[in-house]
Image: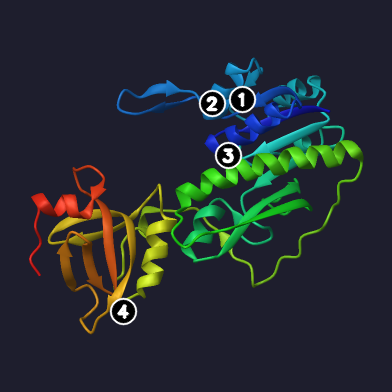
Amino acid sequence: MRVVFMGTPAFAAAVLRRLVDDKWDIAAAYTQPDKPKNRGMKLAPTPVKEFALAHDIPVYQPASCRDEAVLEELRDLEPDIIMVAAYGKLLPKALLEIPRTATLNVHSSVLPQYRGAAPINWAVLNGDQETGVTIQYMAEELDTGDILLVRKTAIPPDEDAASLYDRLAELGGEAASEALRLLEQGSAPRTPQIYGPQYQYASMLSREMSPMDWTRPAAALVNQVRGLLPWPCAATDVAGVRWKVFRAHVGGETEKAPGTILSAGKDGVAVACGDGRSLVITQLQADGGKRMAAADYLRGHPIYC
């Protein structure tokens, strides 16, 4: 089968890599236009573009997929399948109808849970013990298409969203390749989604989610730390300095008021939380500094409790 791939970030590049490794016929890769990056603001290619060019896959970077010229160009590629993974823009109905067989999407949750932009982060923020990837037939409305297959994985209690992102990218590649095999064999299922109030929409993350509220339970704050990596990161002010918090765990019991610093030493910085437990910060980044172990930070910036 002839496949046109559409995707942009590292997640999508991992899916494309698996399709290439499994010898699928990739006719072209569509990705977002190059964007300025870092201090020099030089145009930087997307991860999908970098991978595609390294494997002699033609790359297309239209500013919009709604232009008729872009749609006609895609029709000329005569795809059997369009495989989408984190492309970054809503695709019009005219595009979804181009391939002979189907337009599929790799979504990083077990649909219908966590439709939307940040499903990986929200699974960790909510302390879920399991998540997965869904291969769905694309529809006009975001993440509402029928389900072709689902692959699940456990979320260890110490895993953060950045690590889970990498694992789900690999799982997404496996699932995408399996979906193509099922379509090629004519045995691909199609299960409609039934959405209800028990399912949460995975809205975009924002900096407003960063501040840590010490009246919350310690376990919820651990999930905040895990779930907001790599961006925007959980943050708090300690001794007049703003910290980004990268690693933390639930500590012992305490009767101190929420936000009270209980100890600061080689084991980290322990802070009282609203449920009578402490949160122990073990890795942080102070404003203007580098990410480091809390114990290393304290050697130069002691905190007296």
Check the image and report above or below for 296 versus 280. above
Left or right of residue 219: residue 39: left
Q: Position of residue 173 (x, y in %)?
A: 66, 39
**Which residue, given by chain and number where applicable, does mark 3 sit on?**
88
Which residue extends farthest top? 56
In whole angstroms, how far apart are the C-alphas of marks 1 and 4?
Answer: 50 Å
Q: Amino acid at mark 1?
A: Pro
Q: Quadrant of the C terminus?
A: bottom left
The residue shown at (64%, 72%) is: 198
Whether label 1 touches label 4, CB < 8 Å = no
Residue 294 is marked as none
Label 1 Cα crowd, 10 Å radius (few <14 / some 14-19 / many 20+): some
Q: Earlier in the sequence, mark 2 or mark 1?
A: 2
Label 4 Cα crowd, 10 Å radius (few <14 / some 14-19 / many 20+): some
**Which residue, given by chain and number where applicable, does mark 2 sit on?**
33
The residue shown at (84%, 52%) is: 190
Q: Secondary structure at mark 2?
A: loop
Left or right of residue 30: residue 4: right
Can residue 237 be seen at all in this image of the molecule? yes
Q: Amino acid at mark 2?
A: Pro
In whole angstroms, how far apart are the C-alphas of marks 4 and 3?
Answer: 39 Å
Q: Earlier in the sequence, mark 3 or mark 2?
A: 2
**Which residue, given by chain and number where applicable, does mark 1 sit on?**
62
Q: Quadrant of the N terminus?
A: top right
The residue shown at (59%, 42%) is: 169
Left or right of residue 297: residue 34: right
Q: Secondary structure at mark 4?
A: loop
Q: Nearer the viewer, mark 2 or mark 4?
A: 4
Q: Earlier in the sequence, mark 1 or mark 4?
A: 1
